Image (cartoon, rainbow, N blue to C red):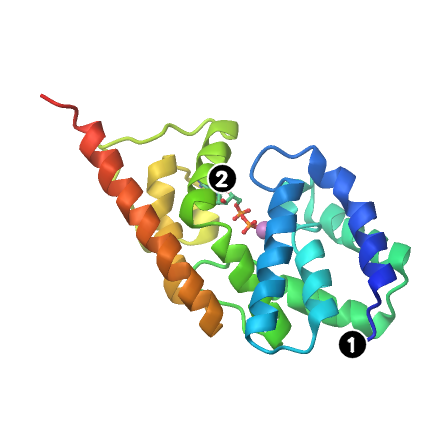
């Protein structure tokens, strides 16, 4: 994927940005931009020479997400439109599709990573789901999907798959146990692991304080 040019990156950015400007569920443009910056940071630290590929995967990683479209096919079409707009060859499209597929979280069934570039973007995407930003996004998602903050009578289930907890949404706090606290151990790159440690620690402090305050002062 070494053939991706700076012009193609710019065209892709300009093409997709309006689509994400309208989102308030945690996939806004700033999420894409943060994932891109974190991915490029990891790329540099890990001495990966596929900088433009990393950037394009980061820019496009959520374009076809079924959650943002009426049907999964609409998602695929949206991605194909970007590919055509920036003039990607068939071979690069195939590699991009594989990389993007590998970026998404699949509960316990981790997709095999086809390349270092996809590992880097997956780590960057997951880093944006934890720490202070992760907490903020999670409550934004919970609010926009009508989830309660917390319910002490619902037990978190660690073994739920992504699909199960989407259908069986519990509370925003439960999402920390169902997904967010697991992400630290799913980092692949050394830099991702290091960055995840601080963010993970911050979430634990947040949760401790949350439960302390939940009990009230009586
Ligand atoms: P991405 O595809 O960017 O990794 P997701 O689509 O999985 O992220 O989720 C977007 C944001 O919404 C994330 O911050 C995630 O933690 C949050 N989120 C997803 N599912 C839930 C849920 N069931 N409850 C609360 N927050 C959620
Ligand atoms: Ni994302």
Per the image, the residue denoted by label 1 is 2
Q: Is residue 111 visible?
A: yes
In this image, 2 relative to 192: left or right?
right
User: In the structure shown, which secondary structural element does the residue marked by tag 2 occupy?
Assistant: helix
The numbered dot on residue 53 is none
Work out whether 4 lies above or below 206: below
- Image coordinates of residue 131 in percent, x first then y, are 41, 48
Mark 2 vs ligand 1: CB below 8 Å: yes
- Image coordinates of residue 144 in percent, x first then y, are 52, 29
Q: Residue at x 72, y 69 (%)?
A: 53
Work out whether 218 lies above or below 109: above
- Image coordinates of residue 126 in percent, x first then y, are 50, 56
Per the image, the residue denoted by label 2 is 137
- Image coordinates of residue 3 in percent, x first then y, are 83, 74
Tell which residue pokes out farthest to the left in this image. 218
- Pick the front one: 19 or 66: 19
């Amino acid at each position: 994927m070494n053939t991706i040019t700076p012009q193609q990156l710019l065209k892709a950015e300009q093409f997709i940005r309006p689509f994400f400007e309208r989102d308030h569920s945690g996939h806004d443009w700033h999420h894409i931009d943060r994932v891109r910056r974190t991915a490029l940071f990891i790329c540099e630290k890990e001495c990966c020479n596929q900088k433009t590929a990393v950037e394009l995967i980061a820019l496009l990683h959520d374009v076809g997400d079924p959650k943002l479209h009426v049907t999964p096919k609409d998602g695929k079409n949206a991605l194909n439109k970007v590919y055509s707009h920036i003039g990607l060859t068939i071979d690069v499209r195939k590699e991009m599709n594989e990389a993007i597929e590998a970026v998404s979280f699949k509960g316990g069934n981790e997709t095999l990573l086809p390349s270092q570039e996809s590992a880097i973007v997956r780590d960057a995407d997951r880093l944006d789901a934890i720490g202070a930003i992760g907490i903020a996004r999670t409550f934004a998602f919970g609010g926009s999907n009508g989830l309660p903050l917390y319910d002490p009578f619902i037990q978190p289930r660690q073994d739920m798959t992504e699909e199960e907890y989407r259908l069986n949404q519990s509370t925003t706090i439960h999402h920390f146990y169902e997904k967010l606290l697991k992400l630290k151990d799913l980092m692949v790159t050394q830099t991702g692991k290091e960055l995840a440690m601080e963010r993970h620690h911050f979430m634990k402090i947040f949760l401790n304080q949350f439960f302390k305050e939940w009990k009230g002062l009586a």
